[in-house]
Image (cartoon, helix red, strand yellow):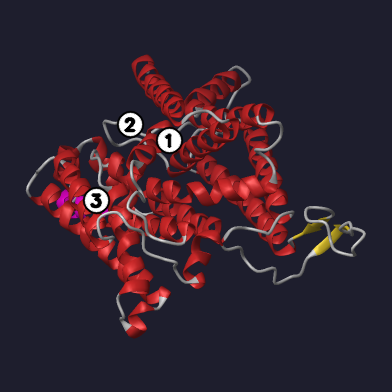
Amino acid sequence: MSTESAPAPQGNVTDEQRPRIAVSALTTNLREYGLIIALIVIMLFFQFTTSGTLFKPVNLSNLVQQNSFIIVMALGMLLVIVSGYIDLSVGSVAGFIGALAANMMVIWQLGPLSNPLVVSIVCLVVGGLIGAAQGYWIAYHRIPSFIVTLAGMLIFRGICQALLGGGSSVGPLPDDFKMLSSGFIPDVIGPLTLIPPTVNAAGKTIMGSGLTLHMTTIVLGLIAVVAYAYFGLRTRRKRERHGYEAEPFPLFVIKTLVASALALFLVYEFASYRGLPVVLLVMGVLISLFVFVTKRMTIGRRIYAMGGNPKAAQLSGINTERLTLLVFINMGVLSALGGLIIAARLGQAVPAAGLGSELDVIAAVFIGGASAMGGVGQVIGAVVGGFIMGVMNNGMSIMGVNVDWQQVVKGLVLLGAVIFDVYNKNKA
């Protein structure tokens, strides 16, 4: 889903060339625009079919908290798939890390090492070591990633079960640790009451009445939207200065306005409940970091080059073995973070944690436009793909659709996304 195009003089664009440039920009970014439109359409569909439940502030907060670990792991899976590999072990690693964290905090008496912050750091390091162990065999011994990570899936699911004594759960986990997944940022600015809450005959406040905004969330949302518009405009001008074709300005304005309006709507919904979930803030930092790494840093460009043509990448001097190892270490750390998020949300470690989530993670990346051949895919696409999966899960659950039919629908959506990708490539 690359947006790069050949340099073209911008100062001498004639009236005859403008329609061609507009069509070219639409065609080049068809997948990106289509994904965002698809997400909006799916959200509106479930808003209608759930009688307005989907967009209720409390449900949107639950939607983010329930699916945050999928999006976090999808960021790492994107780099794995772009590199031309696959990782089937992420769900099992997440379950194992959750069990390890719960044992360190609840069962084993480790003194200062049972502190939630220390446990989280140790678990992230363990996740990185797991990624390194799997990446070593893939990078330096050319064992197919499918085989290595399939073995990892079985191994870490088994260790998870062993840590939990076969089938029991470990908990409850400390409240400080649960804040990672179910906490909200504090309102340091102070709430703004627009409609005072209703008081019943007993003098008690009726829950859900009135309207009070979490102003810290409002301010952070406005800063994020302004930053998005500013950096988008700066990137567009930079492309023009270097002689690259840029999308037509009206199209850029429409895209920015639609994305900003959607973001402000969600910010308002969060602000009218309890503010931004902590895990959403964590996701925002990670997404920004991965966008920067993939678009601005040399290592990001090398990963795309390696996935697009490994032999050419080696001939150009890229150490593909070390790069592959780093990609899997990154995946291991994010799998560990996903496991911590799952355990924090449940408040305990359970044997089924992360079970089957590798399929949701891989589906989110492919729905987001990544190619199974490697070399193609964007961070924003993976995030939108993750939200599409999350909205479908949430919407169908509210509608009361059975789990088996939910799997059928998600499978059809994944198949449609891949067919659309293949159709575009053949057409090109």
The main secondary structure of the magenta stretch is helix
Q: Which mark is residue 160?
A: none
Q: Which badge, 3 or 2, comes first in the chain's sequence?
A: 3
Q: Are marks 3 and 2 in contact (CB under 8 Å)?
A: no
Query: How far from the left and from the top, in percent, is residue 11?
Result: 58, 34
Q: Which mark is residue 157?
A: 3
Instruction: Report how far apart the C-alphas of labels 1 and 3 lie in the structure.
Output: 42 Å
Q: Which mark is residue 4?
A: 1
- Element type at marker 3? helix
Query: How far from the left and from the top, in percent, is residue 16?
Result: 60, 17
- Element type at marker 2? loop
Q: Which badge, 1 or 2, comes first in the chain's sequence?
A: 1
Check disc 3: other Cα within 10 Å, few if <14, some if 14-19, many if 20+: many
Residue, x 42% and y 31% (percent of image)?
367
The quadrant the C terminus occupies is top left
Q: Kindly identify which residue carries mark 2.
A: 371
